[in-house]
Image (cartoon, grey):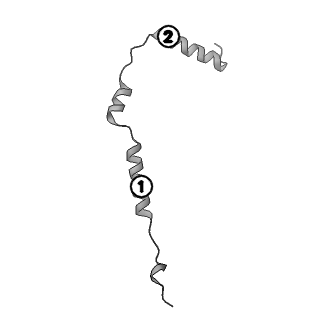
């Protein structure tokens, strides 16, 4: 008995790869966003240090 026209196997690998590549490409950061993240932020060192000390104490770590 021969196979009918509808009994063919369909390869979905190309579609899966294409959608994965598209999703991977779109999930990356835009170069301008990367530059903004690398930019130096002017902040008071004392405020940052106090916040980190309070967070450390809150977590239960003592000096």
Give residue 19's mark: 1
Q: Say which residue appears at 38% left-offset and 51% top-offset.
A: 22
Q: Say which residue appears at 44% left-offset and 63% top-offset.
A: 13
For residue 40, above or below residue 23:
above
Quarter-of-image position of residue 10 = bottom left
| Quadrant holding the C terminus | top right
Q: Say which residue appears at 35% left-offset and 23% top-offset.
A: 39
The percent position of residue 38, horizontal first and vertical second, equals 37, 26
Q: Residues within 10 Å of mark 2 (few under 14, many from 20)?
A: few
SS assignment at label 1 = helix
Q: Residue furthest bottom?
A: 1
The percent position of residue 27, horizontal first and vertical second, equals 41, 43
The percent position of residue 8, horizontal first and vertical second, equals 46, 77
Q: Residue furthest front?
A: 6
Give residue 47's mark: 2
Q: Is residue 63 left or right of residue 34?
A: right
């Amino acid at each position: 008995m021969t196979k009918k026209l509808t009994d063919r196997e369909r390869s979905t690998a190309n579609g899966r790869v294409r959608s994965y590549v598209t999703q991977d490409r779109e999930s990356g950061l835009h170069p301008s966003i990367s530059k903004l993240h690398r930019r130096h932020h002017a902040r008071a060192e004392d405020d940052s240090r106090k916040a980190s000390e309070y967070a450390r104490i809150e977590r239960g770590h003592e000096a």
